[in-house]
Amino acid sequence: MNGHDNGQKKVSRRGFLKAAAAAGAATAAAGCGGNGEIDFAEFFQSHFKEMSKDEVRSVIKRLEDKYSSKYGKQFTVKATEPMENVLFGYALDLSRCIGCRRCVYACVRENNQSRDPQIHWITVLRFKKGEKWMDLEESEKYYSPDKVPEEGYFYMPVQCQQCKNPPCTKVCPVQATWTEPDGMIVVDYNWCIGCRYCMAACPYGARRFNLAEPGLPKDEANPNTHYLGNRPRYRGVVEKCTFCVQRTREGKYPACVEICPVGARKFGNLLDKDSEVRYIIEHERVFRLKEDMNTQPKFFYFFSI
Amino acid sequence: MRIFRLGLLSGLFLTATFSFFAFSALATGEETNPPQAEEENPAKFENEPATFIELQDAQEAADEEAMDDVEEELVPIPEKPGYYRNPAGEIVDDFGIIMRLYESPNACARCHYSKEQYEKLVLRWDQSKHSKNKVTCIKCHGGNDKASTIAEAKSAKTTDFRLTKPSLLTLHGEELFAKAFDYCGQCHGTIYRDWKAGIHGKRTGSWNGDKEYWVCIKCHNPHNPKIRQIKPKPAPIRPARLASKGN
């Protein structure tokens, strides 16, 4: 964790700046009392991967206090570490999906997305059957019939594909987004500078940006959060699907799998040869979205009939 | 250019944060203590029916309510008082019950006759693929549909249907529902195989531990197994209208 600590006591540029700023902030805070110190700690927080366990604990404590007072209920911010020998994979049965968008709204509720302005991590696309459909520009995102599924159409939910070769993490100038050992691509919202390079790099349009202060109503906030997952975001940071890191690292299914009324969504460990996802990859004709991009997604689509 | 922008951005960010320090320290008085932790289960989503079949039933009930205002045009048949012809050309009685289903020589419905049973079971079955493929009541329920007395009807426990597990016919209610896959799997072998492997159907719980395997009848109505249409959740807001009120 603590990679840069090699025992030497040298004043780095960063350390100097920290000390200088600390002095400045202390002066500013001293006059007013209040919580200047907390904001200082937040501003000079280290990169998540470079923090020691104690530092992570103190950061989490600070965030929990902040969220709890902001949303009026006890928040838990976890930093559950990835399990050993686990690589998460996802499969989605396009023959079964009825396009009801229940996954979209379950995701919003579970992952504390902004309600106003609206942010959805999952986009459900509608395609005409029997036509050229791999061209996503032919798809319809804003379909709203009285009833689904409609005759002559099929539906394809798109979310973060958790690529093995992700373009989004490569372009991040501050390494605020990276691949975890269990295959999830996560964002440190405290480290993100909001440059949106990752959004430009992602071929799936899976990343979302908080252009305004996220509007999360107090009574709808989900207090069970993970540092890298569904904790409330700031204005000016990028967010994305994390396969519900707060749930899946505890063995639960992601919220979208739980809610899907037709059971089109499948989730499991790609390294476990008995898992559902492995069975599907071995026995069904799976494909991955935009395979020609060489992003190697861990999200597999298939038609079961 | 990009680097410049980046620099500008972080510069702004720095300034903004420092001014934020000063102002927030001024603005925030004392913080209220958060209330005690509420026991919440994020796996359950409020306002959502527990099973898909309930969701479909709720949808159907809503549809029927809307349809109640629309009177079906029934034409009286002069030579048969009390009977009518519906728009589809079928003969129906006062309740709107299609007589064809009762007049066939081997119909259980001749005795099992009530408006509720008719609408919930017979009419639903009549519209299904099971009806077209001649999978009639006794295929699953057993019994003798050519009987004239109750005792006779109950006497037969097996059918011409090649049940691999005839003992299933003695089960009732919850016991039977829990074994639905054994029932349906007798004909729908490939689906049964997929269901066991986890391709077909829904599983909830834990991806590496205890799972709940949703049995057939949690999503499919046994009397009309086709998935019914439901109302979708609202479409996302178009970017042009995304402007937030607050900011």
Image (cartoon, rainbow, N blue to C red):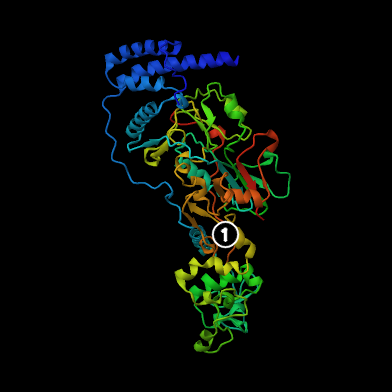
| Residue B223 visible somewhere in the drawing | no
Q: Quadrant of residue B138?
A: bottom right
Local packing at callout 1 (Cα closer than 10 Å; few below 14, some 14-19, many 20+) is some
Q: Is residue A42 above or below residue A9?
A: below
Quarter of the image with the C terminus of chain A is bottom right
Q: Identify the residue under disc 1.
A: B196
Quarter of the image with the N terminus of chain A is top left
| Identity of the residue drawn at 57% across and 35% down | A206
- In terms of depth relative to the viewer, which is nearer, B176 or A122? B176
Output the chain of dot 1.
B
The percent coordinates of residue A104 (x first, y second) are: 52, 43
Q: Is residue B228 above or below residue B136?
A: above
Decide if residue A28 is on the left or right side of residue B82. Answer: left
| Residue A2 visible somewhere in the drawing | yes
Decide if residue A141 is on the left or right side of residue A47. Answer: right
The disc labelled 1 sits on which kind of residue? Answer: Lys
